[in-house]
Amino acid sequence: MVPEVTGLDGAVKDEGRRRLDVRSALRSLFPESPESAPPVPIRRLLYAVLNLLAVAIGAVLLLERIPGIPPWDTIYNDDYWQFLRQALQQPWHVFIPYGGYYQLLPRVIAQFTQYLPLAQASRLFAVCGALIASGCGVFIFHASAGHVRTVWLRAMLGAAVVLMPIAVMEIADNTVCAPWYLMLATFWALLWRPRTRTGMAAAALVAFAAASSEINCVLFAPLVAARLFVLRRPREHAVTAGWLAGCLVQVPAVLSSFVTGQSRIGQTQTGSLNHSLAFYAHEVVLPAPGWHLAWWLQSFAGKNGATAIVAVLLVATVGAILVTQPSNRPFVVTALLISFAICLFDTTVNGYVATVPLWTFAHEPGSRYSVLPIFTIQAVVIVGVDYLVRQRGGLRRPGKASLLPAIAVFALVAVLGGSWVADFRDAAFRSYGNLNWAPVVAKWQYDCAHSRSGAISEKFRNVPQTLPCTHIRP
C-alpha cells in the first residue's frame, strides 16, 4: 500500500509541476512594465506634450506618404459609399451591420461630417485615419516596454507602424482601415501590464475600439485566455474587459447577418488552405523586409525563388532567437501563430484576394491582411535584438561581447531603415483609385440647390441612393 500512495503522491507532484511550468512559461508573455518615473507634475505635463507631438508628427508623415491627389482631398472606398452615405441618410445610426459585423469607430467618425461643411469631409476621414494610426504607434511604444526595454528599439517598433511599407496600398489615411492599425495595438495591449490607471484605461479603450470595429479581434481569444489563466488580479484585466465588451457589441450583428444570409462568409468566394498558405508566403513572408526589396528579388529569382530566399533568412533568424533566447520563446511563438491564424482565416473567408492573381507593384488586393503578420515578424526580430543588446553588454562595452549585438543592430537598421526610405512614398492604389472630393461636393450642392424635393439621387457603386439635402447645402 505504501508504494501505491508514494506513486500517487509523485504523480500529483509531477502534475502540479507541469502546471506550474506552463503557467510560468505563459507568464513570460505578460512581463511587468519597468518602474515609471515619479509623478512630478511638470514632468508629467512634458511627457504628455511629447506624446501628443509624436502623434502629430506621425500623422503628418502618414498624410505625406501618398502621392498624387493628397489623401485629404479624396475619400477612400467604404468611407465614401458606405459610412458617409449612411451618415447623411441616417444620422447617428451607428449600429448598422456591413459584411456581417459592426464597424463602430468608422461610423462614429462619419457622423461628425454633419457638423462640418461637406467639403471638409475628406479631411475629416484622412486626418482621423492618420491620427489613429500614429496614436497606435505611440501606444505600442509604451505597451511594448515589458518586452523591449531598450528605448530606441521601442521607438523603432512604434515607427514601424507609421512607416509600414504596404500601408500606402489600402490602410493609410482613412477610417475604414483604421481598425487594422488598432489590431496591432490590441495585440500589444493584451500583453501589456500597465502600472497606471491611465495606461489601463488606454489599453481597454484600444481593445474596445478594435473589437467593436473589426470582427477579426475575436481571434485574439487564445491570448485573452492565457492572460486570464496567468494574471488573477482584477486590476490586470481592464484590457480584457474592453476586448470582451467590443466582442459582445458584435454579437447581434453577427447573429442577424448569419440568419438573414448577409454574412460575408456566404457572400464572398471562399478560398482554400493551399491558396491561403500561398498568400502568406508571397504576400507576408516575401515583403516582410520591404516592398521594393521584395520586387527587386523577384526580378532575378522569380516570385517563388525570392520567397524562398527571404524565408530561409527569416527561419534562420527566428530559429536563432528560439534556440538562444528561452525567455522570448513564448512571445515569438504566440506572435507568429496568432498572426498566421488571422491571416489564414481572412484569406479563406475572403478567398478572392488569395485566388485571383492581380498583384502588381502598385496594387495588392487584400494587403490589409498582410499588415498584422508582417508587423509581428518585425516585432519578433526587434525583441530578439533587444535581448542581445541587454544581455551581451549592449553597444557601449568594447570587445568581443558587443560584436554580435552590433551586427544585429546594424542589420536591423539597414533592413528596416532601408525599406522605410525606399517605400515611404509610392504611387499605389490610393493614388489613382479615388476621385477628387471637391467636384463631387460641388455637384451635390448644385443638385440640392435645384431640388424641389429636398433630396437628390446619386449612384454608389452603380446603385442609386437618395441623399437628403439637409447637410449638403452650402
Image (cartoon, helix red, strand yellow):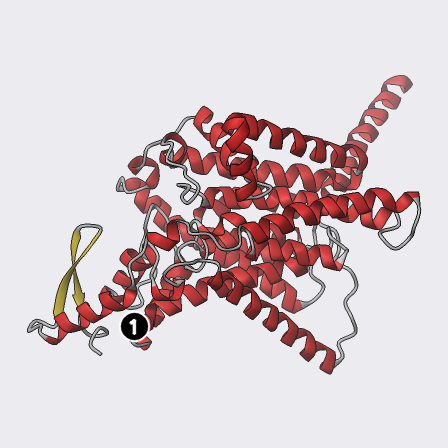
Q: Residue lying farthest front?
A: 300
Say what amino acid the circle numbered 1 marks.
Ala
Question: Can you say which quadrant of the picture contains the C terminus?
Answer: bottom left
Q: Secondary structure at mark 1?
A: helix
Q: Is residue 195 above or below residue 47?
A: above
With 262 as the anchor, is 355 left or right in this view? right
Camera-side residue of 388 and 408: 408
Q: Residue at x 77, y 55 (%)?
A: 149
Camera-side residue of 422 and 282: 422
Residue 416 pos. (x, y %): 64, 48
Q: Which residue is mark 1?
A: 119
Q: Is residue 409 above or below residue 198?
A: above
Q: Quadrant of residue 50?
A: bottom right
Question: Can you say which quadrant of the picture contains the N terminus?
Answer: top right
Tag 1: Cα neighbours inside 10 Å, few (<14), some, or many (≥20)? some
With 197 as the anchor, is 299 left or right in this view? left
Q: How many marks?
A: 1
Q: Residue at x 68, y 55 (%)?
A: 144
Residue 352 pos. (x, y %): 35, 34
Q: Is residue 138 visible?
A: yes
Q: Residue lying farthest right?
A: 399
Residue 13 pos. (x, y %): 83, 30
Residue 381 pos. (x, y %): 69, 43
Q: Residue at x 48, y 58 (%)?
A: 65
